[in-house]
Amino acid sequence: MANRGTNEWISGLATLRATQRQPRVRRYATGPSIDAESPAADDEASPPADRTGHTRPRPMGIGRTTMPTQNEVVCYGCGFQFVVRGRTTVTQCPKCGARLSMKDETITGGFHEECVTAGKVTLTRSAIVDGGKITANDILLEGIIKSGQVRAHKMLTLAKGAELPEDLLDARSLKIGPEASFDFERTLELHDVEVCGELKARIKATGTVTVRASGHLLGQLMAKHLIVEEGGGLNCALDVQPNRTTWSSTEDATESTVAEPQARPLTEPPIIAPIAQATAGDTP
Amino acid sequence: MEHTQGAETVIAAEVEITGTLKTSGSVQFNGTLNGDLIAEGSATIGKGATVKGNLEVDSVAISGTIEGNVTAKDRIQMLASAQVQGDIKAKRLTVEDGVTFVGRSEVNPSGEPVKAATTSSEAAPVSGGVPPKNSELGEGKGSSLFNKK
Ligand SMILES: [Zn+2]
């Protein structure tokens, strides 16, 4: 009886020590965060019991570290890309030293001023931009842009109802929102493209083109990576080659440098013959 | 031997066939085929398989290499290792990241007529965003991202 009481007392002391020391560990731990699935994390979640059913003290020095959120930021001064940890409204570019606003802005109604941020700008359905300059890392366009300068250093999202003259489209990556439908006549040179609505364009993408289940891509596509979810539509002339680095500016997806397919032609007429005609007029 | 409709025929990696391969069932093809493959059921083109010819199937999962056109009544699945040089036509399509695909695709799950058939100069303005035509915008004054040809 007395022995059991001593055991309980020792165990209780050990637990007390553990709880006392844990905050210190959390405060000073700077190493990589412990994955919830890692053995150490499991250990902490359900400490092992000894033969008497009492929990043994956990090994010291291991704590759960909550890492602040990471934000990839592109400097609107020099274009340098860096990572900012945590939420902040202002930061400094490590390359050019520019002080960058990180505020998220929302524009409604008429707008013809300047809005420059390394955060996100949302142009609501009522927004009408006529002149002015909008520069942001991410831009969500639900309204209308008539004129001005619009630059998304990361992602431009065109939502349903958005209007944008195609010569003003200036973004690294493009997303077409659900139920939105856009038809671009110019060649879009982008990094990533995500299609949740309908997009008809001639696209050269250095990254990944994703056609979601609700999306439909038409036209021509030259890309390194392509993902099509089941349900997505694809009516395109394609040249998708993960190992390829560049496409010449005059090259069409239909006149690829890879060897022509050796297959005999289908007895029925070619599948999308008009695409070639559509681009023939563009070719110098 | 009893004839079982829809049974899967497996063709091993070391098999090379010249000519048309036709089956009323499904086929798992891992070898080399110089000719067409016609299957009323589904076809699986294995990772090391090569088909130099056209495929006409109900549905197909492609992990290997195809130099030819692929027509599926239902579904085409291009897995990450797939290499397709040719045109594809199907009701449904899934493409995994990593595929090589040079050709034309006609996949229209909604079944609506395809607008891509119209030339860019004839294309009707689409609903939602209605970008003005180049003639309205003035050519060549766009951003540096675009190379108007
Ligand atoms: Zn900078």
Image: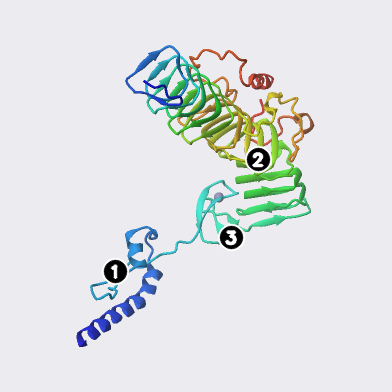
Query: Which kind of residue does numbered mark 1 sit on?
Result: Pro
Task: State whether residue A280 is above or below residue A92.
Answer: above
Query: Residue A70 in the image: x percent, y percent?
Result: 50, 56
Q: Let me know if residue A49 appears in the view.
A: yes
Nearest the camera: B132 or B95? B95
In the rendered image, residues at marks 3 and 1 fall on the same chain:
yes
Q: Earlier in the sequence, mark 2 or mark 1?
A: 1
The kind of secondary structure element at disc 2 is loop
Task: Specify the subunit that label 2 lies on.
Answer: A
Circle on res. A90: 3
> In the rendering, at what x and y percent does residue A263 appear?
50, 15
A130 versus A203 height, above or below: below
Q: Which residue is mark 1?
A: A48
Question: Residue under circle 2?
Answer: A197
Sequence-earlier tag: 2 or 3: 3
Front: mark 2 or 1: 1
Q: Quadrant of the C terminus of chain A?
A: top right
Q: Please check whether the numbered discs 2 and 3 fall on a single chain.
A: yes
